[in-house]
Image: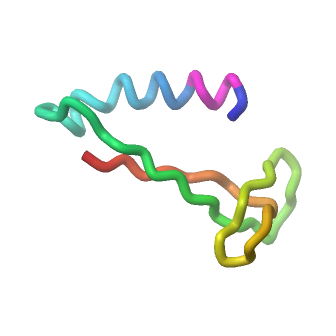
Amino acid sequence: MRDHQQKLLVGWVGALAPLLFPQAKGFALDFHPIPSQGDATGLEQHYLLKRGKAGTSVLSFFAQQ
């Protein structure tokens, strides 16, 4: 993960956690790559489970309490 992505996630989770999880003492992040068919400029290679190999994709995540 790039430094600017790490800083964005830390700030975003820090700001939203009290609103989304007011009683929570912890949560889980679940990361999923979304394959990209378009321009690969600026995108990274992530393992794609259905293809069984790394491919150009956008990494998304879901927060679970």
Instruction: Please state if 50 lies on the left or on the right of 65 as rendered.
Output: right
According to the image, what is the colour scheme of the structure?
rainbow
What residue sits 49% from the left and 50% below the top?
61
Q: From the top left corner, tell me how far across and down residue 28 is, in percent.
A: 36, 44
What residue sits 72% from the left and 30% below the top?
2
- Was residue 34 drawn as part of the magenta stretch in this picture? no
Majority secondary structure of the magenta segment? helix
- Was residue 6 drawn as part of the magenta stretch in this picture? yes
Query: Quarter of the image holding residue 36?
Result: bottom right
Up/down of 40 relative to 9, above or below: below
Q: How many marks?
A: 0
Nearer to us in this view, 39 or 29: 29
| Residue interval drawn in magenta | 3-7
Nearer to us in this view, 38 or 43: 43
Q: From the top left corner, tell me how far across and down residue 52 is, in percent.
A: 74, 73
What residue sits 20% from the left and 37% below the top?
21
Up/down of 63 relative to 35, above or below: above
Up/down of 48 relative to 19, above or below: below
Residue extending farthest front: 52
Residue extending farthest left: 23
What residue sits 74% from the left and 76% below the top?
51
Q: From the top left corner, tell me how far across and down residue 30 is, in percent.
A: 45, 52
Which quarter shows the N terminus? Answer: top right
Query: Quarter of the image holding residue 35?
Result: bottom right
Q: From the top left corner, tell me how far across and down residue 58 is, in percent.
A: 68, 55
Nearer to us in this view, 32 or 19: 32
